[in-house]
Amino acid sequence: MANRNVERTTEHQPGSEGREAALATAISDVATIVNAARVSAARTVNAVLASAYWPVGQRIVEFGQSDRARAEYEVELIAKLADELTAQFGLGFLRQNLQYMRRLFLVFSPGRIGQLRSGISARSAESQIRQTSSGESVALSLVDAFPRP
């Protein structure tokens, strides 16, 4: 009896090039979808973090702007916040990062966020129909200022 366990050869089989091309296309398509999802997720996370960091910067600035004595308090506040928030949330709240949050608030004031997002001045925006309290949130406007793909 002949040996039926003959090794299969890797010779060219009819239609295999078409299947290989289709498989390569499918892999490429799936990789494109996954990469687009990753970019979208990163932008969404960045926008949400910015919308959280902006009011943190606002609080720091508000505590430090009332007078010179309060300016010293701002430095103390940043140090204390850095210690407490780093203990609670990790390294994202070091003093330098809190300074960046403060700067985020100073650079992107409420009127400027609306200007960046919609291209209209704050005065003309006020003449429009008012939103609910949640719709007027500066933090939510900041999320809109960083659109997802």
Image: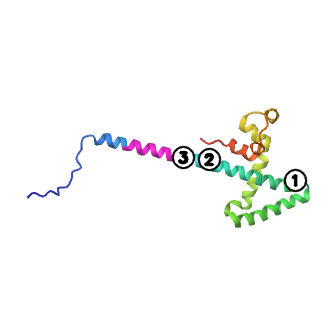
User: Looking at the picture, which amino acid does disc 2 mark?
Assistant: Arg
Asked which quadrant contains residue 141, the reply is top right
Q: Toward the viewer: 4 or 109? A: 4
Asked which quadrant contains residue 132, the reply is top right
Residue at x 21% of width, y 52% of height = 8
CA neighbours of label 3 inside 10 A, class few (<14), some (14 to 19), many (20+): few
Pointer 1 with pointer 2, Cβ within 8 A? no
Estimate the spatial distance between the alpha carbons at disc 3 and disc 1, rounded to whole Å: 42 Å
Asked which quadrant contains residue 68, the reply is bottom right
Which type of secondary structure does the marked residue at label 2 adopt?
Answer: helix
Screen quadrant of the C terminus = top right
Residue at x 33% of width, y 43% of height = 20
Residue 37 has which mark? 3
Residue 135 has which mark? none
User: Looking at the picture, which amino acid does disc 3 mark?
Assistant: Ala
> Range of the magenta residues?
23-37
Residue 43 has which mark? 2
39 vs 88, left or right, is left
Residue at x 72% of width, y 45% of height = 140
Which type of secondary structure does the marked residue at label 3 adopt?
Answer: helix
115 vs 46, left or right, is right
Estimate the spatial distance between the alpha carbons at disc 2 and disc 3, rounded to whole Å: 10 Å
| Above-or-below relation of 96 to 136 | below
**Residue for badge 1:** 65
